[in-house]
Amino acid sequence: MSNWGKHPFNDQTKFKVFSPAVKVFGIGKDISDTKATAAPSLVFVRASVSVLSATTYNLTNPNGWYCFKGKVNVLGKTTINTHCKSHLSSVSGDLAILGKGEKVGAGTTVLGKTIVKRKCD
């Protein structure tokens, strides 16, 4: 939470956790959090793995505060769709080897690409 500086949470705040997602050769699941909440919602996204796949995170709650525990993207593409009012942060370092990644949620990318798309309603 210190990555955000000012935030509406305290040590007692309950949060949602997304388990790691694994996608290999296009087989696996994407991660979605699309229900808008009236109050700020803290969400922890555990590290996921994408190998020779396209992985999509649909994190479109405008009151969502999303914290990534990193990810691994090898010969693949990761797209993070998020609302323009939501907040994103990462708790692990970013690394790109012959790849392209945006800072937030980039994790480790090898011969791949990570894109963050923000959309306002």
Image (cartoon, grey):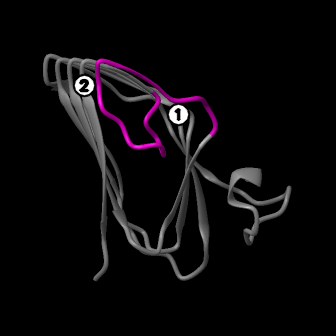
The reply to whether dot 2 and dot 1 touch (C-beta < 8 Å) is no
Residue 95 colored magenta? yes
Task: Confirm whether residue 34 shows in the render.
Answer: no
Q: Tell whether 40 sits left or right of 64.
A: right
Name the magenta segment's main secondary structure.
Answer: loop
For the C terminus, the quadrant is: bottom left
What segment is highlighted magenta in the picture?
Answer: 91-107
Closer to the camera, 119 or 48? 119
Which callout, 2 or 1, points at the residue further toward the start of the chain?
A: 1
Name the side, left or right, on which 63 lies relative to 22: right
Horizontal arrangement in the rendering, residue 100 relative to residue 3 (left or right): left
Q: How far from the left and from the top, in percent, is residue 22?
A: 33, 23
Q: Which residue lies furthest to the front in this view?
A: 98
To which residue does mark 1 refer? Answer: 46
Q: Residue 29 carries which label?
A: none
The answer to whether residue 41 is above or below residue 51 is: below
The residue positioned 76% from the left and 60% from the top of the image is: 13
**Which dot, 2 or 1, sits closer to the camera?**
2
Q: Where is residue 100 in the image (x, y as percent from the top left)?
A: 30, 32
Q: Name the residue under label 2.
A: 112
Name the residue: 17% across, 18% down.
Answer: 52
| Residue 14 at least partly seen | yes
Q: Where is residue 50 shown, x and y percent of the image?
A: 29, 23
68 in relation to 64, above or below: above
Q: What element carries label 2?
A: loop
Task: Name the residue type under label 2.
Answer: Gly
Rendered residue at 47%/29% (across/down): 107
State which quadrant residue 24 falls in.
top left
Residue 74 included in the magenta stretch of the image: no
On the picture, is 30 further left or further right than 3? left
